[in-house]
Amino acid sequence: MRFMVIDFEIIERGGINRIVEGLQYGLEAIGCTFDYYWASRAGRVRNLSQTAPTMVNRRYYRLPARQLPYRGDEARRDYRRLLQDYDVVMFMLPCPHDIKGNTGDMSWVMLYQEAADAGLPIMVMIHDNLWDTYYPWYRQVSDMVTLHMFTCYQSKYDSLARLPGHFVFLPTPLDIRTAALYPQEKIGSVCWMPQWKKWKGIYPFVKALPQIDYPVDLYNAGIEYHNLRNKIGGGWKDGIGLDHVGRKRGRGRMDHQYWGAQLPDILPAIYRQHNVSVDLSGSIGGQRFDGQTSCVMLEAMLYGCVSAVSTRVQEHRWSPLSSADVTWGLPPSANDIAERLNELMADVRLQRRIAYRALEFVREYSDARTHAETILEHLENRQALGHAPGAIEPAFWDTICDDPVPEMVLAQRQDAYVSLHTAVARVLAGTSGPDEDEVGELEESGIGSVPERAGTAEVLEYSGDTIRPLALGGNIDTRWMKFVSGVARAWLEAFDDR
C-alpha cells in the first residue's frame, strides 16, 4: 500500500518527529511505501532537505521531506496528478496552526478536497488533547476523513469526544531492532530530553538541579527555555553550570549542562550513555494533561535508560504505564524530585531491574511494525469496522481503558471559517499582512501565536458619520481580502479627517 504522508509547520514539534520516524519504519518494514511531504502555501519552506534532517533555529529539526505547495490552480493540478500514485493520504497534523504568519489562508483545504474527490481513504493523526483549541477550523474537513489515529489517551475523554469520527489509539511507534540495556556505555548521569513546556514539568526540575548530586545533561528547547533564563527565581543560574547554546556559565554544578536541540541520529547514543531520563509530562494536573505519557518516556526504555516520570503518570488509570512497574516515580516538589533521583542514581542494581522490565514492556507496547499492521487492518477492513467519511458521532477502538466516553456537545461545523489573522480583519487594528518575503520567513520560523478565539473577518463600512465593522462570510480569497484592506485603508487616510 502506498502512503502519501503530508505534514504542516508548527512550533516545537517534539515527539511528532518520533511518530513520523516510527510510522515510516513500521510501514516500510511490512512492505508499504511511505512518501513524506511538507506542505506550505508556496512549497518553498526553507531549511528542508529531501535527504537529511535539518535543524531550525537550534530549537527543533525537520525530517527529510519533499516540498508540497497547496495554494493556486497550478498547485491543485499538480497535487491531483500526484494523488494518482498513492492508495492512502495520511495527514501527520490535521492542518496548519492559525498563526499570524499564515494570514488566515485556507487554501490547505484543497489537500483534503482533492483526496476525497479521488476516492482515496484519508487518515489524520491527532497528537494532543487540544484539537479544538489549536485546530478549530479542522471541523470543516473532518467529515472527509476515513480514520483518525490518536496518540494522546486523554483526548478520548475530552477534546475528541467533541469531534465526530472514527478513532483508533496508536501507541508510540518505535523501531525496536536495537533495543538493549547497554550497561557498558552508562556514564552515571541523568538527561532531560522533552521539549521545554510547563506541562512537561521543566520548572520544578530546574529548581531541583542544585540538589541533584549527579551529572545532568539537558537537551532540546522550547519557549520555557527562553523564559527560564530571564525569570527571576526560576532557578536557571543556580541550576545550570554550563549553557553550551548561550555560551554562558551559571552558578550551578559544572556538570549540570544545557546542550540544546539535537538531530535524530545522535539521540540513541545519548540514551545509551545516560542511566536515567527525566520526563515530567502530565505532572501539573488538570484533565487536559493529567497523567499524559510521551514519546520520551518510551524511547528511553529502548536503550536501558530508566524513565523517571511523574507519580501522576504512574497512578493515572488512563496511563499505559500505570499497571506496569517499568518507571521510577518523581513527586511534584523540587526537593522531592532531587531526593528521589539521588536515591535511584545511587542504586545501580535498582536501575538495571527497572530497565530490564521496561525493555520487555516497550518491545511489546511500541513495536512500530505491529502498529503498522493495525493501520492496514483498519484501512483494509474499514467497511466491516465501520470506518467511513461523514461519521456523525465519535467511535473509539482501543485496549487500555474501559471508562465510558462522556456525552458532549459536538463541535459545530463552520462552513465559512475566517481567521482573525486575515488582512481584512487587521484593518481595525491599523496593521497589514506580511509581504511574500515575510511569509517565507514566517513559514520557516513558525513565528506567530494561536488566536484566543476563532472569529469572523471584518472590514470597515462607512455610513454617515459612523465607521463600523462589516461582517464577511464565505471562503474569502486572501489576495482579494488584501486588496480590499488596502483600498479601505487608503480611503480612510484620504477622507477621514477625525
Image (cartoon, rainbow, N blue to C red):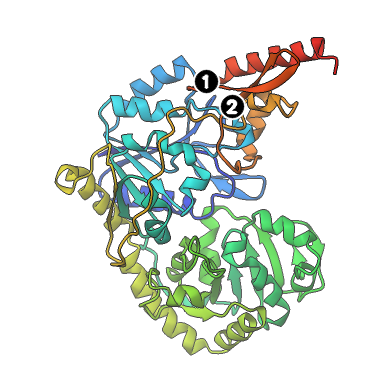
Residue 6 visible in rendering: no
Instruction: Say if 390 sits above or below 60 in the image.
Output: above
Quadrant location, the N terminus: top left
Q: Amino acid at mark 1?
A: Ile
Q: Secondary structure at mark 2?
A: loop
Q: Position of residue 162 (x, y in %)?
A: 39, 49
Instruction: Say if 497 sits above or below 292 in the image.
Output: above
Crowding at mark 2 (Cα within 10 Å: few <14, some 14-19, many 20+): many
The residue that mark 1 highlights is 476
Residue sitting at x 63%, y 29%: 440
Residue sitting at x 25%, y 45%: 31
Q: Position of residue 401 (x, y in %)?
A: 31, 67
Choose between 249 and 106: the one closer to the eye.
106
The residue that mark 2 highlights is 457
Q: Quadrant of residue 433?
A: top right
* Lower position in the chain sequence, tag 2 or tag 1: 2
Residue sitting at x 74%, y 73%: 239
Q: Are marks 2 and 1 in contact (CB under 8 Å)?
A: yes
Q: Amino acid at mark 2?
A: Ala
Q: Quadrant of residue 101?
A: top right
> Hey, which residue is sitting farthest left in the picture?
384
Crowding at mark 1 (Cα within 10 Å: few <14, some 14-19, many 20+): some
Checking the image for residue 426, the label placed there is: none
Residue 291 visible in rendering: yes
Q: Secondary structure at mark 1?
A: loop
Q: Quadrant of residue 213?
A: bottom right
Choose between 130 and 370: the one closer to the eye.
130
Q: Whole-Å distance between the Cαs marked 2 and 1? A: 9 Å
Instruction: Say if 414 sits above or below 289 in the image.
Output: above
Q: Position of residue 189 (x, y in %)?
A: 61, 77
